[in-house]
Image (tube, rainbow, N blue to C red):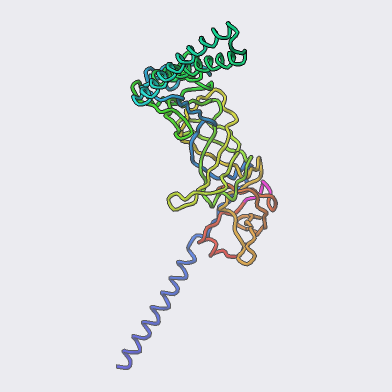
Amino acid sequence: MKKGITITVLILIAAVFFGALYYLYAKNQQSPVVFETEKPETKTIVKTTIATGNIVPDEEVLIKPNISGIIEAVYIKAGESIKAGDPIAKIRVVANVSSVSSSQNQVTAAKIALDNQEKLYKRQKTLFDKGVISANEYDAAEVAYSQAKQTYNASKQGLDIVKTGTSAQLGTYANTLIKSTVTGMVLDVPVKVGNQVIESNNFNEGTTIATLADVGKMIFVGKVDESEVGKIKEKLPIEITVGAIENKKFEAVLQYIAPKGKTENGAIQFEIKGALTNRDTTFIRAGLSANASIILDKAENVLAIKEGLVQFDEKTQKPFVEVETSAQKFEKRDVVLGVSDGIYVQIKSGIKASDKIKVWNQGSKKDDEKPQ
């Protein structure tokens, strides 16, 4: 019995021994880790932040009528270029019954007063010619008669305005023909023949008959998140890409950053504006969606490596890379970093263009924690 137990224990010990030998043999047969290397490159690195928005005219002019009525004719359509003074639309005035009645009563009263003053004037003139009254009395009668005639003419003019919207005496001051006030392109004509329009006054904005703008002066209007607004400032260069215009970039300059943000979808957004500087002959339609790359920093033709090649010291958090000194032999080199675009980073000092940088990953770093 004891002999059998002894044999079993010896067999187990032998199995463990030979298993350990096999494990060590297999491990020694594994291929050694071979690290790849990459050389620094000469690149232009641009650090940007992106804003989304639209291309719109710098100034839009809303043409509104100075009289209420019905659109009788429209002389323009969207997309046309017009000049200041060109006709846009014609309005037919619809008289208000109450206003017409009131104006007619004023005309009647003014005519009665005029007839009465005319009689007095003729009577006084006869007496003056006979030398019965003084010149002062005659002059007073003449002035009263003239004033009565003026009041009568004014009341008739008021009646014409109520009925037709204009009068011969007013000329272009009150006109049913609406004309353009600026030179530019017609962006929109929101009215049609038969539509009723309201005049623009102190109490009402009035009905917009047409929207005009100088499409030669376009700007980008967009929004940036609160996390990015602290990185930008006015006069920074911008590159604009318009989705509807392929293979074309427009240069712009940041002109405006809103001092106050607005909450949109739970995030604070700040409005920005940038003026396009290289429009050339490309026609950009107002309202097109666009993306703006605001250039925060730029380094041209500098020594750069991929950001994935940079390591950071666990204690000092200073950046370094591992440079190959001989076949699969590396040494640690401290580097000074510059501008980064998220993929490549500028190397200000620490390595040369001919150096070979070790490509590492988390697994290889654990196996080779210290540079050789």
Q: Quadrant of the N terminus?
A: bottom left
Is 246 in front, or is 187? 187
Residue beneath the point at 53% across and 21% down? 183
Which residues, given as a range, are shown in magenta?
A: 352-356
- Asked if residue 353 lies in the magenta stretch, the reply is yes
Which image quarter holds the C terminus? bottom right
Q: Residue at x 50, y 24 (%)?
A: 283
x, y percent for residue 20: 44, 75
In the image, taking residue 133 as reference, residue 94 lies left or right, namely left
| Residue 173 visible (yes or no) | yes
- Viewer-nearest residue: 259 or 175: 175
Question: How far from the left and from the top, in percent, is residue 351?
Answer: 68, 51
Left or right, 216 with respect to 348, comes to left
Residue 112 lies, with reference to residue 278, above or below; the image says above
Residue 221 vertical placement versus 101 (above, below) = below
Location of residue 90 by image quarter: top left
